[in-house]
Image (spheres, coloured by chain):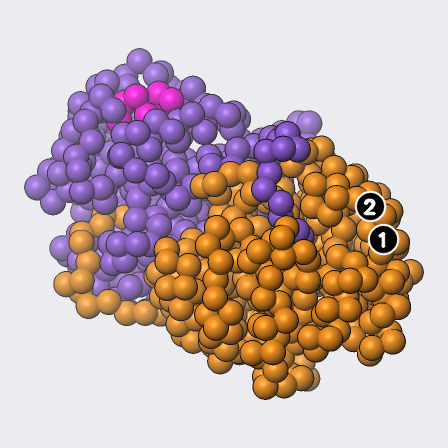
Chain colours: A orange, B purple
Amino acid sequence: MTASDGTRRVRIVEVGLRDGLQIEPRTVATADKARLARALVAAGIRDFEIASFVSPRAVPQMADAEDLLAALRDLGPEVELTALVPNRRGAERAVAAGVGGMVVFASASESHNAKNLNRSIDGSLAAFAEVAALGRQAGVPVHGAIATAFGCPFEGEVPVAGVVRVARAYADLGIRRIALGDTTGMATPPLVRQRVEALRSALPDVEIALHFHNTRGIGLANVMEGLALGVDRYESSIGGLGGCPFVPAATGNIATEDLAYLLAECGCDTGVDLDRLIEAERLAESIVGRTLPGQVSKAGPRLRRYALDDARTAAG
Amino acid sequence: MTASDGTRRVRIVEVGLRDGLQIEPRTVATADKARLARALVAAGIRDFEIASFVSPRAVPQMADAEDLLAALRDLGPEVELTALVPNRRGAERAVAAGVGGMVVFASASESHNAKNLNRSIDGSLAAFAEVAALGRQAGVPVHGAIATAFGCPFEGEVPVAGVVRVARAYADLGIRRIALGDTTGMATPPLVRQRVEALRSALPDVEIALHFHNTRGIGLANVMEGLALGVDRYESSIGGLGGCPFVPAATGNIATEDLAYLLAECGCDTGVDLDRLIEAERLAESIVGRTLPGQVSKAGPRLRRYALDDARTAAG
């Protein structure tokens, strides 16, 4: 979206409290999650995937979804707090908790969907019809996410038709915003182009969001391709919180502060204050108790100046 | 460059043995450097910045430049082993050691040049005239590098005119290949575009190479911009060896294996075998005794498959 002054507006959606924390072995206290969300709001973030209304037994880290939403109720409607819902039961909980939007999620590959949701893609889509109906009834917007949209860790390549198929089913339910999820870091610039173009061609009225992981180091290169394609909505996690369920040493989502830095340097208006975002990143590190992979939080803003005697000699 | 079959050829220049190791506190044995170079050659790397003929007192890690070149003499002319030379004395050593190319280097900002080379930019350029003369006489090609080409840690923004000025001086010495160095990770896609376009406009016959650091996480986003501009030569270090002289926690050069992965996925032919490059990265980690920041070496190739029971559940 381009503002009247010609500046391109790009939305950053913070998913660290959901996708990022989900893989953390230690359960994070609701109060810490709320503090982190507030620090991110103070930095200018307005869009959050904040929780997941799945079974607390399956994902203990998300068991406090209701409490977290209650703790953030005062943030008001200009902050959109969405949550993942896998089925009618989750949607009922989410609506009762006062969620700002519900995100249904299926994979573009059967084996990942089975692993993640313990049912077929069609089974998931059938359940989402109930979620969509409940959302309409309750006046809560429903959005869609497609996991393994750029490849599947079990099946390998995922045909673009599989992605379009799920997106069409979402659109048939009235969904108008769909995030393509790079679940295990298999997205590449040509795949981003192919999938975004296919989705636009099939569903011109749907807004596309891109959700990249930095598992193979090229998450922000994929953002560059998304920007070239005119995509204006990107999901990331503060500090690069999160990981890959297969590779303990691999990083997770692209880091919000690195994304915000790149977007600002490319002339986009994200509404985010980088210094405050770096403060939020420090808070995230203190909450999870370790250094996170994001880089800008370590190096600081681009024009940070050093005194001549700060540096070790570095030819070249 | 595009091959007859339409494939774009892109060169990866490995600078880990010079720019990467230079910041390592512990001196790496010549035999280990040679082993790493050979592992990289086995992976298909053909272009190296292998050493620096500077004062051994100033940069002890580079004190074995002659020995390293001697240890690699059998690699033959299809492997280009270049070295940095700051002045006539360095050039004499480099030529005597049988270097495949000499790289002169000045900064685009006075204070960085003074810090790095203990003289003014003009003073450096005067010394390079002697290097160029020696190179012509000895039949050794001379290339140019421009440090702080995208910003200076002491001065902040570096005017594009400062970069063009050094490049013109290089071209006047007969230099036909110039690398723009992002010394402390201040390059951004718009600055890449601006500087590449300015250099091409001023010096259409000069080949441009791009040397990015990943200090702020956007090194490969800058490569994407370079690719869009038609630049076909990139410098990187295996594993992302190296660092920033100011920020101990910050990463150094972009990682060769992540760059090679991105280029291959974008359809470019680099001549590099990713599996063997990952083996070379493991060797680099064992030599420096720590985990390096490159990502592909941790996550593995894109189509690596997992068994269904490998994964922890990861909704979304």
Q: At label 2, which amino acid type do we have?
A: Ile
Q: Residue at x 61, y 82 (%)?
A: A73
- Residue A240 percent location from the top left of the image: 49, 56
Disc ID at residue A135: none
Q: At label 1, which amino acid type do we have?
A: Leu
Side of B284 relative to B61 (left or right): right
- Residue B199 percent location from the top left of the image: 45, 55
Examine the image and state in which quarter residue A270 appears. Answer: bottom right
* Residue at numbered disc 2: A121
**Label 1 marks which chain's residue?**
A
Q: Residue at x 62, y 45 (%)?
A: B313
Disc ID at residue A125: 1
Where disc 2 sits, the SS reads: helix
Instruction: State the extent of the magenta-drawn residues as a range.
Output: B33-39
Q: Is residue A247 above or below residue B65?
A: below
- Residue B230 or B184: which is nearer the viewer? B184
What is the CA distance from the residue labelled 1 to the residue labelled 2? 6 Å
User: Can I make out residue A6 in this image?
Assistant: no
Contact between marks 1 and 2 (CB within 8 A): the answer is yes
Q: Quadrant of the N terminus of chain B?
A: top right
Spot the residue most to the right: A172
Examine the image and state in which quarter residue B62 appears. Answer: top left
